[in-house]
């Protein structure tokens, strides 16, 4: 069985096996007919794909097959790889640290390690994404062909979010290839053993899968890097991520481990992040990689001497926003809930973000909020961003509320800190109590604690409006000028109603990619 459970996609295949068969599947555009396909079986070679295009499968098989008994079929059923995708933005992940303000802050021992912002989270994300077996495979142009705006991507609220071109619901048909094992007692560890013996070529997905075999089973990272690089140079995004990760491994003196090179690692991450967005099924590109965008954003956000990358908040914001734009359409949540003065508890997530898209999105939203909270020159930092970003606490809260809606505990915690201290908002300890309560319930680490003096408030609790009634009694007055006439007793009461002004909605933003400044 393959090491992943990805659905079939165009230009990259998925595979599985039974006792006597190997099954390989990939997608082709709906208009494809049988005569458009080229599928050639040999005893230990297979070549399959659309005529005139780069083969989806071209390699030497792991073991011999009975090629006379093997067959393929073009399914009639129409299929969309993004059938569950919605047009609403969203996503999240446990972040590497929560920021602290001087007053209502937990003890330092209760805060997640601040180390280098985002680095712990990057490691977790990379570990979770290690088995991206059939990631889409975008092509790569030279690094110089890509650039980003000189100013951060501002997420002002447009009326609607367009689905990115590469995520539009294009329909496909499935090609299924059934390979009969010659020896059904052998379990295949990987579908391929090397390059096609006649063409001396190997498709990108096969390079990636064989690279995984050398990396995980054989512990030969040098050979794995060679295979990943071969696929990455042709635009296989998952291979770019793998190549970048192997360049970050430190094992001096081990001939089976490549020499650490932080610059090359960053270059591969950036190439994966800068891939061009294209329609599925028309080329080998299905757009940039969200994880790569997050990693590149984090590197710019903290700077890296080893990678020769200066701290650059504008670039960090660009790649964080790029990550959010890629993942938002894949998240099943209604962000218009943020338009309501109050979101009922029943409509909130009661668990932390768990899909890759949710984690990437919320990590980017959380880090973006931190940048906007203090701007380019936060107090206490010796190294500042080489580009300017103005502090905007309102915008920070807006990003954090997006992540909080998805169950991001630390985003909830930071919102509570702002309300408890009146940072960028009107001080409101009662509202802070609601956000602290939600943060504590979502926190799975036990590292977040509520500051003294703040009571936890149930999310659906309603703040009472107190009435301040003051009565002023007027003394009876006598007028001496009118004989026998006494004034009536007059008692006046003035009722002063106290009113509380609340911020109704912060207005949910929807993400759109900024065009390159001309």
Image (cartoon, rainbow, N blue to C red):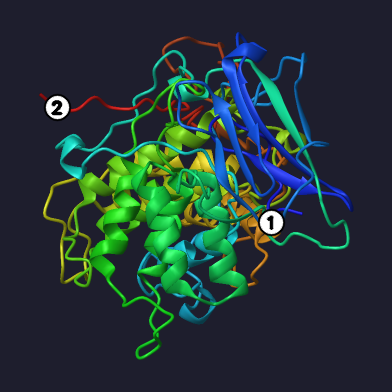
- Most foreground residue, 145 or 181: 181
Classify mark 2: residues with Cα within 10 Å, few (<14), some (14-19) or many (20+).
few
- Most foreground residue, 137 or 474: 137
- The residue indicated by pointer 2 is 517
Residue located 66% across and 55% down the image: 437
Q: In terms of secondary structure, where does tag 1 sit?
A: loop
Question: What quarter of the picture does the N terminus occupy?
Answer: bottom right
Q: In terms of secondary structure, where does tag 2 sit?
A: loop
Q: Position of residue 96 (x, y in %)?
A: 47, 65
* Relative vertical location of residue 20 with respect to residue 46 in this rendering, above or below: below
- The residue indicated by pointer 1 is 3
* Relative vertical location of residue 337 with respect to residue 345 in this rendering, above or below: above
- Most foreground residue, 424 or 74: 74
Determine whether label 2 and label 1 are within 8 Å by CB. no
Question: What quarter of the picture does the C terminus occupy?
Answer: top left
Residue located 86% across and 50% down the image: 18
* Relative vertical location of residue 430 with respect to residue 221 in this rendering, above or below: above
Q: Position of residue 198 (x, y in %)?
A: 50, 45
| Residue 121 left/right relative to 444 | left
**Which label number is shown at residue 133?**
none
Q: Position of residue 170 (x, y in %)?
A: 58, 15
Determine if residue 36 is in view. Answer: yes
Classify mark 1: residues with Cα within 10 Å, few (<14), some (14-19) or many (20+).
some
Counting residues from the start of the chain, the first of labels 2 and 1 encountered is 1
Determine if residue 469 is in view. Answer: no
């Amino acid at each position: 069985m393959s090491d992943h459970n990805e659905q079939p996609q165009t230009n990259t295949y998925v595979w599985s096996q039974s006792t006597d068969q190997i099954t390989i599947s990939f997608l082709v555009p709906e208009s494809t007919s049988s005569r458009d396909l080229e599928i050639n079986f040999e005893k230990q070679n297979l070549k399959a794909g659309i005529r005139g295009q780069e083969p989806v499968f071209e390699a030497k098989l792991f073991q011999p097959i009975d090629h006379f008994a093997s067959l393929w079929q073009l399914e009639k059923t129409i299929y969309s790889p993004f059938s569950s995708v919605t047009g609403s933005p969203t996503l999240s992940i446990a972040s590497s640290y929560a920021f602290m303000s001087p007053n209502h802050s937990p003890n330092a021992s209760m805060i997640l390690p601040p180390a280098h912002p985002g680095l712990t989270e990057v490691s977790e994300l990379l570990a979770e994404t290690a088995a991206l077996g059939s990631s889409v495979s975008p092509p790569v142009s030279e690094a110089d062909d890509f650039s980003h705006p000189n100013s951060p991507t501002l997420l002002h609220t447009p009326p609607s979010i367009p689905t990115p071109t590469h995520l539009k619901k294009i329909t496909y048909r499935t090609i299924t290839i059934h390979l009969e094992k010659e020896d059904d007692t052998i379990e295949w560890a990987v579908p391929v053993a090397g390059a096609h013996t006649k063409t001396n070529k190997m498709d990108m997905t096969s390079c990636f899968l064989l690279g995984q075999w050398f990396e995980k089973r054989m512990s030969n990272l040098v050979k794995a890097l060679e295979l990943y690089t071969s696929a990455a140079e042709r635009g296989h995004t998952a291979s770019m991520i793998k190549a970048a990760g192997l360049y970050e491994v430190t094992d001096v003196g081990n001939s089976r481990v490549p020499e650490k090179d932080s610059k090359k690692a960053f270059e591969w991450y950036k190439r994966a992040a800068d891939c061009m967005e294209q329609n599925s099924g028309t080329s080998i590109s299905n757009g940039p990689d969200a994880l790569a965008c997050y990693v590149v954003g984090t590197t710019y956000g903290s700077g890296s001497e080893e990678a020769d990358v200066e701290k650059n908040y504008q670039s960090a914001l660009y790649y964080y926003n790029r990550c959010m734009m890629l993942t938002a359409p894949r998240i099943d949540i209604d962000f218009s809930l943020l338009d309501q003065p109050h979101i009922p508890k029943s409509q909130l997530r009661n668990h932390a973000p768990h899909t890759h898209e949710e984690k990437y999105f919320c990590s980017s939203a959380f880090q973006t909020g931190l940048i906007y909270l203090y701007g380019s020159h936060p107090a206490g930092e010796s190294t500042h961003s080489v580009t300017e970003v103005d502090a905007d606490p309102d915008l920070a809260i807006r990003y954090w509320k997006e992540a909080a809606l998805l169950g991001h505990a630390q985003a909830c915690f930071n919102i509570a800190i702002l309300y408890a201290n009146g940072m960028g908002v009107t001080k409101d300890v009662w509202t802070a109590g609601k956000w602290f309560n939600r943060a504590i319930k979502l926190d799975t680490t036990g590292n977040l604690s509520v500051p003294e003096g703040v009571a936890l408030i149930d999310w659906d609790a309603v703040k009472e409006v107190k009435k301040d009634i003051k009565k002023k009694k007027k003394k009876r007055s006598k007028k001496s000028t009118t004989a026998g006439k006494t004034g009536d007793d007059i008692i006046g009461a003035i009722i002063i109603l106290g009113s509380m002004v609340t911020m109704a909605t912060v207005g949910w933003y929807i993400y759109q990619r900024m065009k390159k400044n001309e």
